[in-house]
Image (cartoon, rainbow, N blue to C red):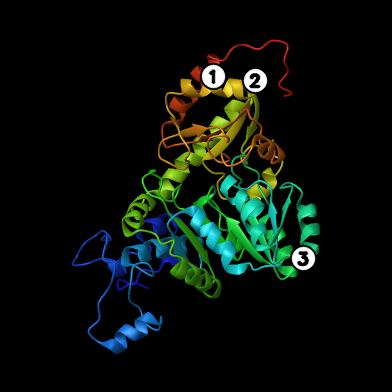
Amino acid sequence: MSRKGFHPESVSPGTRSVWAGEEEYLLQGSTQVPVVHSVSFGYENLEDWHEVALGKREGHIYSRITNPTVKVFEEKVRCLEGAEAAVSFATGMAAISASLFTFLSPGSRVVAIKDTYGGTNKLFLDFLPRFHVETVLCDTHDFAGIEAEMDQGCDLLYLETPTNPTLKVVDVERLSRAAHGQGGLVVVDNTFATPINQNPLNLGADLVIHSATKFLGGHADALGGIVCGPEELVRKVYHYREINGGTLHPMAAYLLLRGMKTLHLRVRQQNESALTIARWLESQPQVDRVYYPGLESHPHYETARKQMRGFGGVLSFSLEGGFDAVRSFLPHLRLAHLAANLGSVETVAGPPRTTSHVECTEEERRAMGIPEGLIRYSVGIEETEDLLADLKQALDRLPRRTGVSSGK
């Protein structure tokens, strides 16, 4: 509780995104959280200094460990996810890596899905096996198959939903229950959904992760990551970060905080636009398939409806003609950055081979069900009608293909 008596749990998520975590750190009547660049924090009393250093009382010692501006960012996300604690990182991948290496040891067994972000996938394929951690990647749509693998042993279950870039949805509640039955820890990447649309902790997950670089910040000007969950677990992740040093910079924390003031407004617009665009793309002859959990045609539409309040601002679609069509189509978009990012106020588009799965070979992408003709389209906050018109003019420039069925 702040000195004004504000209780985050008493207001809606949109209001939390504006107010949560800030009041304690406003200085000398300021209405905005200051950026505290100080590396260290001094104490005149050695006993007070020692108690803060041991974590027995509030305070800051050294900004690699904690920082006032960073603390506010952590508190805001903690409130949005309904968690006991949160710890931030320099990037989303730092948050993911730290969570895995905190809880895994040689001989541990990880069960995960094939459809994770490319960098995460590389942790499972290349890095963890070097430390003698067994990793099993399951077909994302096969919930029974994932459960069967966990029956063979599961120290940690790693999920991402919706997935990047094919927007698959996993049943967090069902799979969390199965993992806990085996004594496993459940970690969920909630980046695509955002805490406005989905709260994995309420569905049974133990830890939830965000690449704050994406929707949380929303302006493509700051890197960051965060892990939320029970105090006991987050404390362990915090200790890993404290020693390994993947600390969020206070200026980045300030920019992320500023972006989060409008999180609920941005996500609301992006949800609405993405659904309208996905439905429109399904009717276009140049489009082979649309990937978006808000479509009734999505294989796990009912699961998405059950666990999500909105379906998110990212969709993907594959074009007839494969990567040649992608190469022809993308440069004609006028209202989209062709870049390796998502979740921004501006629309961003690109193929997995240069964005989410650039680290992977074409064979690895194919094994994950990612066609070379796929385009990831992160909807910004532009007017929906303008984005539709932009997509239409770019599609109309594609060469007409005859004698080819889209299978629709």
Question: Around disc 3, counting alpha carbons within 10 Å, would you say few (fewer than 14), some (14 to 19), or many (20 or more)?
Answer: some
User: Residue 383 sits in which quadrant?
Assistant: top left
Q: Tag 2: residue type? A: Gly
Report x, y in % for residue 263: 42, 49
Sequence order check, earlier mark of 2 and 1: 2
Is 296 in front, or is 71? Answer: 71
For mark 3, what is the residue? 153
Q: Residue at x 43, y 54 (%)?
A: 224
Would you place residue 116 above or below residue 340 in this image?
below
For mark 2, what is the residue? 321
Q: Are marks 2 and 1 in contact (CB under 8 Å)?
A: yes
Q: Residue at x 67, y 58 (%)?
A: 129
Sequence order check, earlier mark of 2 and 3: 3
Label 2: element kind: loop
Cα distance, mark 3 to mark 1?
Answer: 47 Å
Q: Residue at x 35, y 57 (%)?
A: 253
For mark 1, what is the residue? 328
Would residue 239 appear left or right of 294 to someone viewing this image? left
Q: Residue at x 65, y 20 (%)?
A: 321
Would you place residue 271 above or below residue 87 in this image?
above
Would residue 358 appear left or right of 175 to someone viewing this image? left
Residue 406 visible in the snapshot:
yes
